[in-house]
Image (cartoon, rainbow, N blue to C red):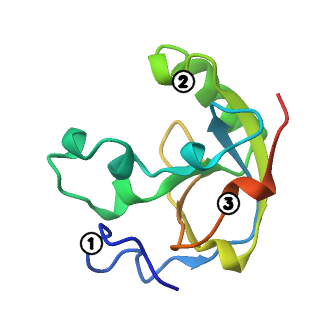
């Protein structure tokens, strides 16, 4: 797989596995579009002092519907996500690599790195 030019060395991490399984992501568009699948660094490099790292190059997804519902509720305070919707997608290895990256609040959180040329939005549909 070829990765975006801004990915730092060792990104995705060696521990990441081929993408697979059902995941949930907050999206703004219905249907989901390319813009809904930009990693944080690509959306706003200044926010990260123009220094990409493994974390800000990955997309956030959840494997648990309750986790994504909690995230949606919390993200309503962020203007960009005020009207976000929950999209469900079935990942496959052509869509990149994924790694379980839980936090105390989000035990089903995964980081997902998408290779150049992949079109992840085509496997997602709005469910709420």
Task: Identify the secondary structure beneath mark 3.
Answer: helix
Pointer 2: what residue?
A: 81
| Residue closer to the observer: 64 or 8 | 8
Judged left or right of residue 108, residue 103 is left
Nearer mark to the viewer, of 3 and 1: 3
- 3D distance between C-alphas at marks 1 and 2: 27 Å
User: Where does the image place residue 77, in percent across and percent down from the top left?
Assistant: 48, 13
Residue 8 image-quadrant placement: bottom left
Question: Does 66 sit above or below residue 97?
Answer: above
Q: Callout 3: 10 Å neighbours few (<14), some, many (20+)? A: many
Pointer 1: what residue?
A: 8
Labelled disc at residue 120? 3
Residue 30 image-quadrant placement: top right
Q: How many marks?
A: 3
CB contact under 8 Å: marks 3 and 1: no
- 3D distance between C-alphas at marks 2 and 3: 19 Å
Question: Does 46 sit above or below residue 12?
Answer: above
Mark before the other along the chain sequence, 3 or 1? 1
Mark before the other along the chain sequence, 1 or 2? 1
């Amino acid at each position: 797989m070829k990765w975006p030019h801004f990915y730092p060395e060792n990104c995705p991490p060696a521990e990441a596995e081929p993408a697979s399984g059902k995941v949930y992501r907050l999206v703004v568009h219905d249907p989901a579009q390319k813009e809904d699948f930009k990693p944080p660094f690509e959306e706003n490099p200044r926010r990260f002092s123009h220094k990409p790292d493994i974390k800000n190059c990955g997309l956030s997804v959840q494997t648990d519907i309750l986790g994504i519902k909690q995230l949606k509720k919390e993200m309503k305070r962020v203007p960009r996500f005020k009207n976000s919707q929950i999209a469900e997608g079935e990942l496959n290895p052509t869509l990149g690599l994924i790694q379980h990256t839980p936090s105390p609040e989000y035990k089903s959180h995964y980081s997902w790195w998408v290779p150049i040329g992949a079109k992840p939005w085509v496997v997602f549909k709005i469910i709420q």
